[in-house]
Amino acid sequence: MNIFDKFKAGLNKSSKSLSSGLNDLIFKKKIDDDMLNELEDFLIQSDVGVESAKELREKFSNTKVDPKKSEKDEIYKIFSNYVSEILKPLEKNLENIKQSKPSVILIAGVNGVGKTTTIGKLGKILSQNNKKIIFGAADTFRAAAVDQLEVWAKKIKAEIIKSSEGADPASVAYKALDYGKKNNFDYLLIDTAGRLQNKKNLMDEFKKITTVIKKIDSASPHETFLILDATTGQSAINQVEEFKKITPITGIIMTKLDGTAKGGILLAIGRKFKLPIVALGFGENEDDLQTFNSQYFANALMQS
């Protein structure tokens, strides 16, 4: 299966939902104000966001359909081009991460979004070309997270620095960076707690982690990636807003796209926050995290 096929398979539910709704509207009605109003409502319900729905409505209303072409093909093309146009500037190339020894990536996200699994998969991507990977298990409030990260470390031949349950997360982050620097690692991925319900504590925790690792490398963390679960739909927007108050976000990774028809939420988030998009998760297998490609995403979302 090539990369585009993975995008198509991973976005199959979202694509079917969008194409089914669009087809119903296109085949039942001519393009007039009533149809465009229904189209806008449908797009909002599909989680693409109010602003995107309005802009797409405007594009559809200004479209002069070539009589030699089908309305369906024209609308699909407009939609696909719009998605690509919005998201293309947000593609995040992992090769452009500031090179340090190691480059430090903080991983943020609420519990349940697949954060720890995504760290393992991201570690595998970054380990290409014999890059040395180390994990910092700083989500010390969940023993399961540490155990899970250990499994991934063994799987991709990474190392891991951990501590006992309930230990100071900043201490784990400091030890991981100290070890990574002394042993010439290329990337350090630091798992963090996801207890967003206690925002004050979480904010203090991130601040402390950042403060202590800066004692070793004043430029760290070099990146902070936020993990979002596509199945949560609109609540993912709230999570971005809340985490932006806690720590500067330099990229997002969206998981579980294969399990939802709400893939349009990526467009809404991209349109609203303009945060770089790092990768998308399309399943449980270790190769199911794919670096983001806007054209693949747009075309796969609008596969008929």
Image (cartoon, rainbow, N blue to C red):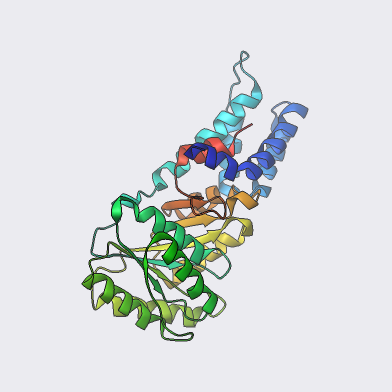
Using the rendered image of the protein, determine whether residue 218 is visible from the camera's viewpoint. Answer: no
For this view, does 301 lie left or right of residue 99? right
Can residue 57 be seen here? The reply is yes
* Residue 188 locus on image (x, y percent): 33, 66
Single out the residue that lies furthest toward the top.
68
Q: Residue at x 48, y 37 (%)?
A: 2
Q: Position of residue 191 (x, y in %)?
A: 43, 70
Q: Position of residue 164 (x, y in %)?
A: 45, 85
Of the pair 46 and 173, the residue shown nearer to us:
173
Q: Is residue 280 left or right of residue 123?
A: right
**Quarter of the figure that contains the C terminus:** top right
**Relative to 126, is 38 above or below?**
above
Relative side of 226 to 33, left or right: left
User: Residue lying furthest right in this view?
Assistant: 28
Residue 203 lies in quadrant: bottom left
Q: Position of residue 214 (x, y in %)?
A: 26, 75
111 horizontally vs 186: left or right: right
Q: Quadrant of residue 179?
A: bottom left
Residue at 57% in and 60% down: 236
